[in-house]
Structure formats: C-alpha cells, structure tokens
Image (tube, rainbow, N blue to C red):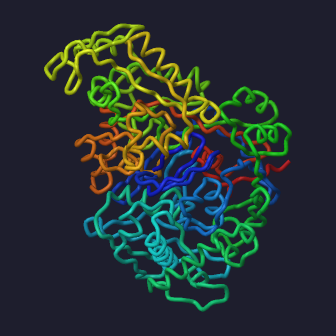
Amino acid sequence: MNRSHPLVRAFAICALVITAALGVAACGGSSSKSGSNSGSGSTGTAPSTAAISYGALPTSAGTPTKGGTITFGQLDGATPTYIFPIIPGTAATAYTLDMIQNLYAPLYNGPDGASPKIDYSTSIGEKPVFTNGGKTVTIKMRPGYKWSNGAPVDANDMIFEIDLLKAAVKESAANWSQYTPGQFPTSVVSATEPSKYTLVMKLNKAYNPDYFLNNQVQDTNNVFPLPSTDWNIDKAGGPHLSYANPANAKKIYDYLNSQGKSVAEFATSPLWKDVSGPYKLGAFSTTNSSFTLVPNPDYPGPGPYATIQVNTYTSFTAQLNALQSGSLEVAQVDQSQLGAVPQLKSDGFTVFGGPSLGWKAGVINFEDKTDDFDNVIKQLYVRQAISHLVDQPAYVKGIFKTAGSVNYSAVPQLPATQWVAANNKTQGGPYPYSPSAAVSLLKSHGWKVVPNGQTTCQKAGTGSGECGAGIPAGTPIKFTWVDTPQSEVPSSPLEGQALASEAKSAAGIDLELVTKTFNYQISNFDDADPSTKKNANQWGVANYGGFFYDYYPASEGVFNTTGVFNAGGYSNPTADKLMNASVFSSNPNALTQEASNLASDPPAFWMPQNDYIFAVSNKIGGKPLSNFGSLTQNTLLPQFWYVIKK
C-alpha cells in the first residue's frame, strides 16, 4: 500500500517517492485481489463492474477490426522513465508500469475489469497451493507463453526473477518499489523447479495465503518472470552467467538496471525486444515520452487486436481538448472537468468511473500536544463525535458532484472486495452524520458544549462522565486541520471548510484550517520518521489524500504501532493484533476483522473516495467490455480493445 495523492497511483512499502499526475512511485507494504478460496490464496469475488459508481461501462461491443490504432492519453510528469521490470521506487509511476506490464506478462495479471483482483485467464501463474503450514508455496505456470527469442516462459524465469530481486534489495531497499524489508523476496529460503512449469518456494515463515499471493507475488502486477536464457549477462555480448551465484546475480542486476534507465534505447536495445506480453514497444519518444505498443504475434492469448498509441499531454485541459477535437480516443477526465461530460457524450464518448482500491481521510496526529490535543484525541468518544460531524453523503453530492463514494474504514466499500466489514456497509458507517449525536457524546463525557463558541472540558478526570486522562479543566477541542491546495486536490480544502463550519456551529469545536502542498505534508508530517518529530505540534489532522492498496487491502505498516507509514502515531493493541493476523495468520476472516476494528476505533477521519473517470470513444470496442474497467484501477490493459468495424 502507499501513501498517495488522489490523482496519483501507488504500489507497495519501503521508501516513498511520489510523482504528480496519475502516476506514483513508492514502496508500500500490505495489500491486494481474486476468487473465493482463501486456502489457495485467492481473493475477492466481486463482479467486474462492482467498482463502477459513475456512469456505466461501454455496452456495445461492435464487430472487431484486426489492426488499426487506438490513441490513449497520459499526463506529463509521470511518464515512463524506466523499462527493466524490477522497478525502483523513483521510477514506479502508473505509466511506467502500464508500459512494462504490456511488454512483460506478469506472473499474476489484473485487475479483472474494474474489480481489484487477479484475472487468472490472462495470468501465467495458476492459483498457488500452500502446504507445510503455509511455508511452502507451489505455483503451476501455464505453458504456451514464450519469449521473442523462442524460449518458453517457465519456472526458471521466475527463479531468475527472485535471484535478481534478492540482489537488488540487498543493495538497497529502494531498488524495488514493492519491497517491504524482510518480506518477498527475502522471505524466500529457496526457489526450485521440480518440473519445467512448476515453481516451489520455501518461505522462512508462514504468511496469510491471501496476503502472500496478493501483496507479495502479485504486488499490483510488479512480479514478472524474466528471460533467464537471454538476460543472464553483465554486459552486452557477454557470457551467460549462473544467476544462482549471488555475486553473478548482482552483476546481472547492476547491468540490467543501468540499461533500464536509458530512455533513448527503450525502443532500440535488443534487451527490451525480448518480450512475453501482448505487445512490443514499437517506438518511444525521447522528447515527451509518448510511446507505441504494437501487437506481439507470439502472444498466446486472444488479442491484441490493435496498435496502442500512448500520447503525452501537458495537462488535463490539453488532454480534454484532444478528446473534444477527436484526436484522442481514451483518456482520463479530471473531476474539475465534469461539466464537459454531457458534450463528450454528445460527441460519441462513453464516460464512466469508480474509485481505486484504497481510502481517503484526514490522518489524525496523536502526538500533537498543542492545547492537549494528544490527550483529547486519544479519547475514542471524541473521535466518534467528530466522525458524526462528517457528512459524507453531502460531500459526495456537493463536492464530488456525485463522482465519488462514501467510505468509513481502511477497507473501502468500493471497489467491492470480500473483506468489507459489516460496519462499513451500513448507512453512514458506525458513526453516521448526526450533529446531535456528537453533542450528546461530548456532554455525557464532561464537556461544556457551546455551539458557535468554544467547547471546553468542564469535568476533568477519568471517571464516568468526565473528560478523560490528561485533559485539564478548561481545555478546548481545538486543532489544526491541514488540507492540500485546491490546485492539487480540488476536494481537499472543500472538505476541510465543510467540516470546520459544521464542527464550530454545531459543537463548538475549533478547526484552524491550513493549506500545505501534498509533498510538504508527506515530507514534514510523519510521526514515524524521527527526522520530522520536530513538527509534531504543527498539525492535528493532515488531509493529504490517503493510501492506495494492492489487491489485499491490509493496513499493516500504516496503522500498526511500529508501522513505517504510521504518520499519525496511532496505537491500539487490539488493532496491532488484528493487523498482524491479516499478514501472518491463516484466518481467512482476519482482514475483515481488522477493517471492522479500524472503522469502530478510527485512526483517521474517513472521507469519500474520488472516482477515476474515463472517456472512451464509441468507435472503440472491447472483448470483454469490462476490460475498460481496469482504467478505474489505474491500469492500462488494452489487449482486448479494438477498432469497431464500420
């Protein structure tokens, strides 16, 4: 999972490096997608349209044309800068991964339409089997995939990937954007090939099967078999080396990593012409990073049908202009551009959207001592009261113009997964909007509530009907609420203004609104980072956006006491135990129990999720049509797209 700007896509935990516009880099740590048999490491069972909350997916498939070109828009600032499939945190933008995963078939592909889960029909790996108490993982690989040099994609190619990953993260955790220290690939004691298409991994400890599959080896399409008979070299034309030798693996990784940064050679180097995915890279512009994906004739599955031309635009405005002029056929539409949707529909586009798997919230700083806020906010009833003042349905209607969805926990309502807790499915969540309930809670705990004034603690102490430990009489409920600029996240300051107004008028709670950029907030407001401890008293709540997850949306690393992303210093022994179980136990319900706890004992003030909205020309069909839904999960999977025959 990764801390992320709402316009940004993130992947898994180590160091956090984020790039603006629909792309994100990072390291993250728990999360991810598919099926229903948790014993075999599968995930959610939601239908492929379950995440579409704005508009509807295209409905007319039309007659496919073999050939032709489909244009897709990407935004400047997050364009591909790397091509070697072991992607470092500094390069792990959505557009980089879009390019790479279409060239190199992932072990586990996804999403399945708009549902954040594995699509086994386009994956090399079958569902894994866990034995030996969960410490041995056996993966059957589907035959039929091959490299451009004619060699089959087999288990040795996954062993090659694991050996190079180990070499990469040994040098630096930042060398692989998905790496969580101590976990995959470090957790793999041995990887063997008992038969050509069978991979057996022995782990140093047991993991929850869903977690290991969807966070470790699926990792949002970031684990790829690599061509072990072609890339096992440390220089151009060099001898083929045994990658089982760690020293050789390091040499090989260092060479491929150095070549992977050379943008000028993306479309010309022999290395990157040896692919296994549905496309080859036909061209790459060193001027603006536009690129062309041409069908790979050796790909075994149905499709691809058309060439995909990915064009770079300097802004959402420039991209919208291209849609309106007819020079662009598939692109994201920013929420600030919803007024253009009727005209786009009139011009022959289908417009739809849905949230990516993750959450948005105002992250609470439990270490802010200003006005004794740390002691005030530790009281569960205070967090409950403030949660009662967040009118999410009104925010979705007014701020998001209906292009959003409510959510009351770390595992969101949408896109639907099997782990959504019951208390997040109820209307309004566990603490539905109710100013009267907020006031009642405060009064019953010893506060003198002064609507439109300043509410203060009237009955200090730890007994029944008293304010709670460490709260002196006369203490106000007053704190700094930090939003991002409207130019970065249009909804953020509007959420802050709405809550501040409601809190003051209904309950006498004083929110001082401050604006800081997204990059400033994640760099300076982080209780888990010793270098920013000096800023602990400068913020009470940071509404910078939220987190995106892999397909298993666990919050270990984010809300556990020692989590490297625990920016607000939330600490709850019960939550720690549940998060640990989500990662290491065999309990298939562990994640749901974790999600329920984080809804009832909130570490943040949950906010609605914004929809990711896309326009698709009605000249373009899909097989299946739900394949367009992957765009809402910030993933470009165009192998089933085609130009409709006239």
Examine the rendering and report whether any part of residue 23 can be seen: yes
Q: Residue reaching furthest front?
A: 534
Viewer-side residue, 184 vs 50: 184
Task: In the rendered view, tell whether residue 378 sits above or below residue 71.
Answer: above
State the image coordinates of residue 207 (x, y, percent, origin top left): 31, 60
State the image coordinates of residue 113 (x, y, percent, origin top left): 58, 48
The residue that appears at 40% across and 25% down in the rendered structure is: 479
The residue that appears at 67% across and 77% down in the rendered structure is: 271
Quarter of the view holding residue 261: bottom right
State the image coordinates of residue 15 (x, y, percent, origin top left): 47, 56
Task: In the rendered view, tell whether residue 631 sits above or below residue 299.
Answer: above
Left or right: 22 as drawn, with respect to 557 = right
Tell how many labels: 0
State the image coordinates of residue 591 (x, y, percent, origin top left): 33, 46
Viewer-side residue, 288 vs 243: 288
The residue that appears at 43% across and 81% down in the rendered structure is: 193
Viewer-side residue, 508 vs 121: 508
Left or right: 389 as drawn, with respect to 523 = left
The residue that appears at 64% across and 64% down in the rendered structure is: 82
Examine the rendering and report whether any part of residue 197 can be seen: no
Q: Residue reaching furthest bottom?
A: 239
Left or right: 438 as drawn, with respect to 216 = left
